[in-house]
Image (cartoon, grey):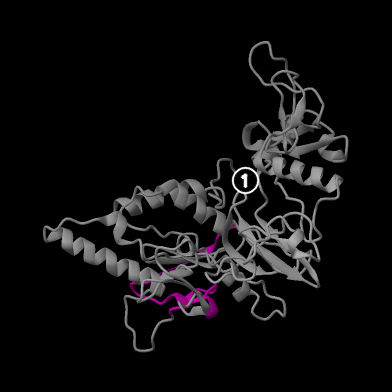
Amino acid sequence: MAAKSVLLCVCFSLCSVYVNCNTVLCQVGFCQDFHLRNTCPATAPDCTFNNATHSGLTLPSPTICNCCPYCLPLYNKGQPCSLGGAGAGITVGRCGHGLTCDRTTRLCVRMKTKCHDAQDEYDERYSKGETGIMETRPVCDLKGDYAPYICIPSQTCFCQSEDGEKLFGEIPYTGIFTNMPCRCSRMAHKIEKLLGKDVPYPVFGLRCTADGNFNPVQCLNNICYCVDPITGEKRGDRTIDLNRDYVSQLPCYNAHLDINPIKEDSKPPYKYTTPCYESVQEREDLLEQSRREGYNVDYFSSFSSISCLPDGTFGRITVNSTGSKICVNEFGERLADYSAEQNTPEFNNMDCKCALTAYVMRNSNEPPRCCKNGNFRPIQCRLGQCRCVDSDGRQVGLESTDVTKLPCYTLNWRSC
């Protein structure tokens, strides 16, 4: 119960970004009457311009019921700004997206972030002709953090955190118009980081789809409802109580996303769960029974062999009967012959990222080449050109027709 209470608190604080409260503080017609008695002050013209020299952010006005329009000017790089506080000067706007006010010069400067540093490093190498044909310039958001997803040409697009860490959610690359909001994947990652290792049982709140979006059906304490797949906002007032009804009665239910559909002879109470969630629940029930019977219970290591991903499926690495690690798909089926024996470097650093990318690209004629343990082979080749890649399969540096000229070249580069 403690873990569920923590989850409710975390979900409320995070989900408030995506869910409208619809709280009505002002009566209908208030602003109409307000305009009959008052004149709104002139707004900054920046929101109207929104060009290279003048731009602004339209916000609710700091007046009763927000009846008047309001524009917050956004200053460009090099323009004067204020840090606030006594004697710091007064400005009516703030530095624009990706900028911050320098404490010394009081001018808007580019934020110092990990993503901006990566852009600068790429730009420097690009100016020297040292970037590869399949390298892409890092994309940063308005806060200077990494964009929600990244695409590797001719390969896949996958979700990433604000720090550029690869997250759950990967689809085949289909061109420059690919769009992956990845909000569910990022939100699940934040919850995992906030909870850390401080709760005895794994906690599952959100359920995502394979592309990092929200599953249109979300459930909490046996109550299920519809949400927007992109934003996670609740849609409509319809809810389903699994103690009486099955989730398929919701208009947003998608049978293709239900990996553990109800059996025809099932009776209430029903479940909207997955085999992975059920395995965790069975382990949790067993531990609680042991605790009640007076046994010492090691909660924190009891779930080390069970890992559920944000879509409710098992983790993509598991241990077989011989103690070796193997790569598996969302159904727990082994992927090719990727494996690693215990007490080997390949076992310790196994991530199966290449095996999973190849699985996503299973209909492609040019899947990536993987090491025996399912990791990306450091050298990938395509159309006669070979290139070094990182652990996520992203090109690093120039390509070459001669693999021995690549900085990542080793004698066993083919077998790794």
The total of numbered circles placed on residues is 1
Picture quadrant where residue 361 is located: bottom right
Left or right placement of residue 246 versus residue 19 in this view: left
Identify which residue, 241 or 342, lies in the foreground. 342
Q: Residue furthest bottom?
A: 265
Left or right: 359 with respect to 303? right
Q: Residues within 10 Å of mark 1 (few under 14, many from 20)?
A: few
The residue where tag 1 is placed is 28
> Where in the figure is residue 266, as x and y percent of width and height?
34, 84
Is 337 drawn above or below residue 155 in the view shown?
A: below
The residue under label 1 is which amino acid type?
A: Val
In the rendered image, the vertical position of residue 144 relative to residue 94, given as above or below: below
Q: Position of residue 228 (x, y in %)?
A: 59, 63
Work out which quarter of the rendered image holds the C terminus and state it.
Answer: bottom right
Image quadrant holding the N terminus, namely: bottom left
Q: Which residue appears farthest toward the left when viewing the image?
A: 294
Q: Residue furthest top?
A: 87
The percent position of residue 287, horizontal first and vertical second, equals 22, 62
Q: Nearer the viewer, residue 25 or 183?
A: 183
- Which percent across, then down, holds residue 79? 82, 26
Image quadrant in which you'd find residue 284: bottom left
Which quadrant of the figure has residue 83?
Answer: top right
Which residue is drawn at the image coordinates 74% and 58% (left, top)? 406
Q: Is residue 232 at all visible to an observer of this figure?
A: no
Membership of 252 in magenta stretch: yes
| Nearer to us in this view, 415 or 73 | 415
The reply to whether residue 59 is visible in this rendering is yes
Q: Any magenta on residue 412? A: no
The residue lying at 34 percent from left, 89 percent from top is: 265
Q: Which residues lie in the magenta part?
A: 231-260
Element type where label 1 sits in the image: loop
